[in-house]
Amino acid sequence: MGMRETEGSLKAYFIVAGVLGALVTVNDLNGIGAVSSLLPASWKLPIYAHDLVRIALSVGFIIAGARLKAELPRGARWIQQLLLLGLVMQLGTTIWLGALIGGQVPGLYIPALVGMLITAYLLHNLRRLAAEAMARSIPPAKIV
């Protein structure tokens, strides 16, 4: 039997991933700022737009972790959409980077594949926990 995430482990994941994601993105932005004059203009807008989306996703993950308990009985739809957005962003970034520098960077796709698999795993567990919480919140039928 595989691992089954609990509400607590999912909450911890969202908060830790959100904080780490924000810190890594701010660090990336600092690094890009230092070399931005060397980058082609066609790369700057996609890089900065991507990092702004990463910051927004990181903040969303922190909020998702903080609100998880309250959101599960309601289906946690916005958290599911947040994970789907993260999945789409990982795929898009991988395709974009692959088109720009893919042949020059061995192993570029492995971290992206691992990230997408983890996101899909979390989405599956979020849906399961939401279904369980929704089932618990339905009052029993009255027999007349």
Image: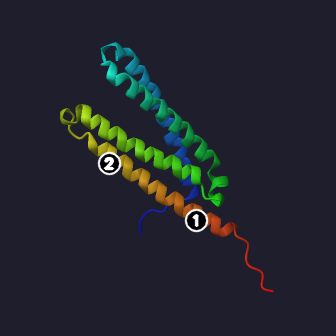
The residue at the far bottom in this view is 144
Coloring applied to the structure: rainbow
Image quarter (top left, top right, bottom left or bottom right) of the C terminus: bottom right
Q: Secondary structure at mark 2?
A: helix
Q: Secondary structure at mark 1?
A: helix
> Which callout, 1 or 2, points at the residue further toward the start of the chain?
2
The reply, left or right, for residue 41 in relation to residue 144 is: left
Amino acid type shown at disc 2:
Leu
Q: Distance between the Cα atoms at labels 1 and 2?
A: 27 Å
Q: Is residue 48 above or below residue 127?
A: above
Residue occupied by mark 2? 113
Task: Bin the neighbour count of mark 1 within 10 Å (Cα to Cα): few under 14, some 14-19, many 20 and up.
Answer: some
Task: Bin the neighbour count of mark 2 within 10 Å (Cα to Cα): few under 14, some 14-19, many 20 and up.
Answer: some
Q: Is residue 46 above or below residue 125?
A: above
Residue 41: quadrant of the picture: top left
Task: Please provide percent x and percent y for residue 24.
Answer: 44, 31
The residue at the far right in this view is 144
Res. 5 in view = no
The reply, left or right, for residue 96 in relation to residue 89 is: left
Q: Is residue 137 above or below residue 111?
A: below
At a point 43% along the width and 56% down the height, the residue shown is 121
At a point 27% along the width and 43% down the height, the residue shown is 109
